[in-house]
Image: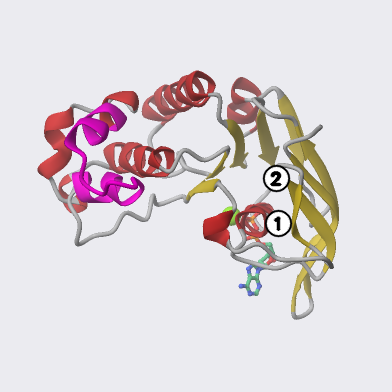
Amino acid sequence: MSLLSLTGVSKRYGEVRALDRATLSVEPGTLTAIVGASGSGKTTLLRLVAGFEMPDEGSITFDDLQIAGPLRIVPPHRRGVGLVSPEGALFPHLSVGGNVGFGLESRSDPAQIAALLAAVELDPSIRTRMPHELSGGQQQRVALARALARRPKLMLLDEPFSALDAGLRANMREMVKRRLQAEGVTGILVTHDQQEALSFADQLAVLEDGHV
Ligand code: ADP
Ligand code: MG
């Protein structure tokens, strides 16, 4: 049984068909890459899976439950899905520790925060810093640690390395891959970079004008 299935999912914004009868299955414990040019519908697909948008037609099943479709809609915080955006989108007014702790049930458990920072290969002493005091790569690591803190079954990564230079990109990609595999988290990486997609994934999907 697939962990995630999209069946005939469409999403329009006015005249634009951002996603057109998209069908995709993701098996548990695997890494999928979705490649496509800018505007092909990659972010729309992830936002539908995360629950920030609703499909116009079709259905999405996650973990044996219909989460979007004619029968029901499950809100984002009840889906067990993590999302890391291109800029990381850390809370600017919270420290690193505060950001990571936000994902935890016990908001400020220092041991858990330190373990999560170590998991993304950051020195735990960084926890008192504010987001603006970090490099782009460090911010993305913190964003990933925050998403992992919620123990999602599925991690959605929306071009999370696009702001990083080539060397750091490869390094981050390998780190993310190791981390998801170690935690048994299923992953979907969206990218416009074919090389990145191939070195990350077990399964590759190509999006073109809203078609998978
Ligand atoms: P990608 O992430 O592959 O660059 P998107 O999913 O962001 O593509 O966008 C797919 C298409 O939908 C584009 O033509 C984009 O302009 C359009 N689109 C996305 N979000 C909106 C929105 N909120 N309102 C109107 N058009 C949108
Ligand atoms: Mg996008």
Is 117 or 201 nearer to us in this picture? Answer: 117
Furthest residue to the bottom? 14
Q: Is residue 113 magenta?
A: yes
Question: In the figure, residue 66 lies in which quadrant?
Answer: bottom right
Q: Are marks 1 and 2 in contact (CB under 8 Å)?
A: yes
Q: CA distance from mark 1 to mark 2?
A: 8 Å
Question: In the figure, residue 156 lies in which quadrant?
Answer: top right
Quarter of the image that includes the N terminus? top right
Question: In the figure, residue 184 lies in which quadrant?
Answer: top right
Question: What's the magenta region?
Answer: 96-116
Residue 71 image point, x, y percent: 82, 65
Can see residue 212? Answer: no
What kind of element bears circle 1? loop
Residue 4 image point, x, y percent: 74, 42
Label 2 residue near ligand 1, CB within 8 Å:
yes
Tell me the chief SS of the magenta region. helix
Q: Is residue 135 magenta?
A: no
Q: Quadrant of ligand 1?
A: bottom right
Give the label, 1 or 2, closer to the camera: 1
Label 1 residue near ligand 1, CB within 8 Å:
yes
Name the residue tied to disc 2.
Answer: 36
Q: Mark 1 vs mark 2: which is more N-terminal?
A: 2
Q: Residue at x 17, y 36 (%)?
A: 110
What kind of element bears circle 2? loop
Amino acid on which the number 2 mark rests in the picture = Gly
Q: Which mark is on residue 41?
A: 1
